[in-house]
Image (spheres, grey):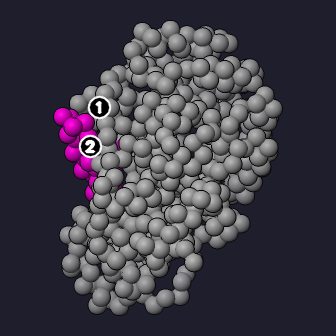
Amino acid sequence: MAEQHAAERVSGAKLPSLENVNKLKGALHGELLRPGDDEYESARRIHNGMIDRRPAMIVRCAGVADVMRAVSFAREHEMLVAVRGGGHGVPGFAVCNDGMMIDLSRMKSVRVDPTRRTARAEGGSTWGDFDPETQAFGLATTGGLARPTGIAGLTLGGGQGFLMRKHALACDNLLSVDVVTADGGLVTASVSENADLYWGVRGGGGNFGVVTSFEYRLHELGPVLGGLVIYPMGQAQALLKFYREFTASAPDELGPLAVLATLPDGTKAVVTLLCYSGASAGGERLLRPLRNFGPPIADQVSVMPYTAVQGIVENFNPRGLRNYWKTLYMKKLTDDAIKVMVECYSTVPSPNTHVVLYTLGGAVARVAADETAVGFRDACHALLIVGMWSEPAGDEANIRWVRQFWEKMQPFASGGFYVNYEAETGLEKVKAAYGPHKFERLAVLKTKYDPTNLFRLNQNIPPAG
């Protein structure tokens, strides 16, 4: 990559003595793994197969006390810190070379209060852990598009998902968080307690500490009308123009995606992935024109549990493939933008690579611009270029293709990007993600809660000054 990621740098700092490491190990309720330990190799691996880093130690936390001990130890010994929640993030912030990986993946409990319609989940939970618990009571909140995605990274970066047009982003449904800050202490942030931090964690990523639990607002949700409709690539431009007009007037209950993809038999296709959360009869009428367009190669839409819709995307993004993603926002999906998208995809170097068009608006846009750290709520669409391939020999060609696609889409971009989906890092990128006003506010907040930038393996916001 153009800029070497901080997680790959060796700081030159002296590692803690074996005596001190053993003291930490003895104080933990969880585990401390080092190179050579039986589970070290599997523990350091994350979803993106291109990330191959070797921490000096991995602290597998059993609870909040372990997180507090790990943070304090890392600060005292000036160790580089990576924090793993679900381990699904493409940039690989969850793991570092030579430092400490604080691993929350064993902290996965989810507790639902059906009377208050809330759920509290530990920071290592994935949406595959969370959604079945809430759906047992006919409830849900906006979550990720795939079950292996961690609730922590997705929510802290904003949280786009199938339900966002109806119920806003995941972070907009966040009622409170518990955070282990850089001094090793635990604080709670909500609208009534540490409100400045509560604002910052809703979009500001992992910059302010390790979030050990999330409390969400839940909403009634029964079975949904969802699934894939697949069309020939020859219809792509016409279909995407129709999709643009169709979604512009669709009710908030419709959470749609359009995807340029390659089918298992090697055929390129344009696909819609739909999730309608209203009454199924109304959904059948609403979706009929889209499902009849073409006609499609295949129509797999049916009434299904919400958890089944959440299970579709992971089939197209298996763990261990090499990933490089780039993203941008658009206020308008023009005919020219559609033409460039389709032409660019015709040269895709890997059959695993796909391009996803998110439709925003609805409740996402109705949240006040300054209510959270999330920016660019006025965008109508977000474009995600998902580069995926299997062999290291393909790195250069695939990364170059993703970057060239992204560059060709710049004339249609409206500014900013969604931090959860961007592979590149760097100060100017982060400033662009938040805009000057929010970036300055986040930097002041960073100075208060993490003045030495201990938590810097993220889309990093340095302390002010």
Q: Secondary structure at mark 2?
A: strand
Question: Number of labelled discs?
Answer: 2
In this view of the protein, can residue 292 be seen by the observer?
A: yes
Kindly indicate the quadrant of the structure image that contains residue 412. Answer: top right
From the top left corner, tell me how far across and down residue 316 is, in percent. Answer: 53, 38
Is 300 situated left or right of 106 in this image? right
From the top left corner, tell me how far across and down residue 464 is, in percent. Answer: 55, 74
CB-based contact (under 8 Å), mark 1 and mark 2:
yes
Instruction: Identify the residue at horizontal 62%, vertical 56% (top origin).
Output: 435
Q: Quadrant of the N terminus?
A: bottom right
Numbered circle sitting on residue 266: none
Amino acid on which disc 2 is placed: Ala
Amino acid on which disc 1 is placed: Leu
* Magenta extent: 106-127
Residue 453 is one of the magenta-drawn residues: no
Which of the pair 49/448 is nearer the observer? Answer: 448
Kindly indicate the quadrant of the structure image that contains residue 436. Answer: bottom right
Is 385 situated left or right of 144 in this image? right
Determine the CA span between mark 1 and mark 2: 10 Å
Q: Quadrant of the C terminus?
A: bottom right
Instruction: Identify the residue at horizontal 48%, vertical 18% (top origin).
Output: 301
Instruction: Identify the residue at horizontal 50%, vertical 54% (top origin).
Output: 373
Is 315 situated left or right of 29 in this image? right
Which of the pair 301/171 is nearer the observer? Answer: 171
Which residue is the site of mark 2?
119
Which residue is the site of mark 1?
139
Q: Secondary structure at mark 1?
A: strand
Which of the pair 408/415 is nearer the observer? Answer: 415
In this view of the protein, can residue 80 be seen by the observer?
A: no
From the top left corner, tell me how far across and down residue 257 is, in percent. Answer: 57, 30
Q: Is residue 148 above or below residue 190?
A: above
